[in-house]
Image (cartoon, rainbow, N blue to C red):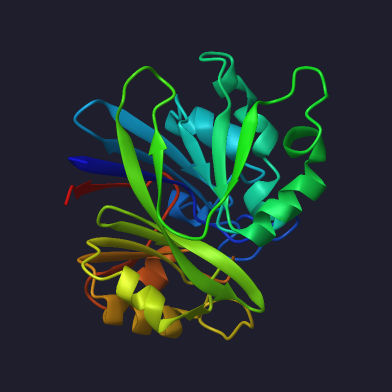
Amino acid sequence: MSSLRATLLGTGTSTGVPVIGCSCTVCTSEDPRDNRLRCSAYIVAETDEGPIHLVIDTGPDLRQQALRYGVEKVDGVLYTHHHFDHIVGVDDLRPYCFSPRTSIPCYANEETADSLRGTHGYIFKDGTYPGIVKLSLHEIDGPFSVGSRYGHNGSVTVIPVPARHGDMDVLGFRIGRFAYLTDVNAVTEESFALLADVEVLILDGLRETPHQTHFTFAEATAVAQRVAARETYFIHMTHTVLHAEMNAQLPEGIQLAYDGLTLYVEGE
């Protein structure tokens, strides 16, 4: 892989921001960085043979995100976990199966794969519904490769990074020197080792006050400083977080992300 481009399609918590019916300072902010769709990312990894296009999570805003930020091709989908705000937009992948008419591989841990078979059995179990989106589900427990659906032989290696989201096993993902971990509140020693030499880290940072399944900004900062990436960006923020105000308080090299932020990472 020669380089990677990552676009953050959404950086908000499960309600999105503005929150429906809320008139707080953040929800009524005129700063576009305070408008946060649900978390998802689009990765374009350049190989010698051609680009590989990856989507991380398919939340309820996927169609809007794809149109807004130009998600034109999808070679594979990486699932962090099976909560509603990370899977429910899966049907919006259907246009990517119009051409080429090949299935899109979806990668998930065992728990998420089992959940997808239950919530979206018409896709992942029986496949009988007319006009169904063509997806293939792959359970992962270690590094794997994703190839192109668009006529070239390039591929990229993806390294799952196990973490905890309360009592749930979730996955972050490392691609080259880029890593993405949302919805986490614990990282193991083994996973810290998998993050060695990462240049750009995307990391869960919900808010300042404690939460039982997400990192606070202080906790996320401690993780970020241990990983010591060149750049770290927090995602999954609530409507208690005013971008300009909070961003000014973060240490050097750590920032709040925002929807549409595009990052570039050189290959290894």
Please report the residue visible at 45 percent of the width from the left and 26 percent of the height from the top. 73
Front residue of this view, candidates 221 and 144: 144
Label count reads 0
In the rendered image of this protein, does residue 83 appear above or below residue 213? above
- Considering only vertical position in the picture, is 236 above or below 264? below
Where is residue 101 shown, x and y percent of the image? 57, 15
In the rendered image, residue 183, in percent from the top left (x then y), is placed at 56, 67
**Residue 210 vertical placement versus 204 (above, below):** below
Question: Which residue is drawn at the image coordinates 25% and 64% (left, top)?
Answer: 198
State the image coordinates of residue 252 (x, y, percent, origin top left): 22, 74
Q: Give the side of residue 49 with respect to residue 7, left or right.
A: left
Give the left or right position of residue 204, taking residue 177 as reference: right
Q: Residue at x 63, y 52 (%)?
A: 86
Along the horizontal axis of the image, is 65 left or right of 193? right
Q: Can you see residue 201?
A: yes
Q: Is 64 in front, or is 1?
A: 1
* Residue 261 coordinates in the image, percent (x, y): 36, 48
Foreground: 222 or 50?
50
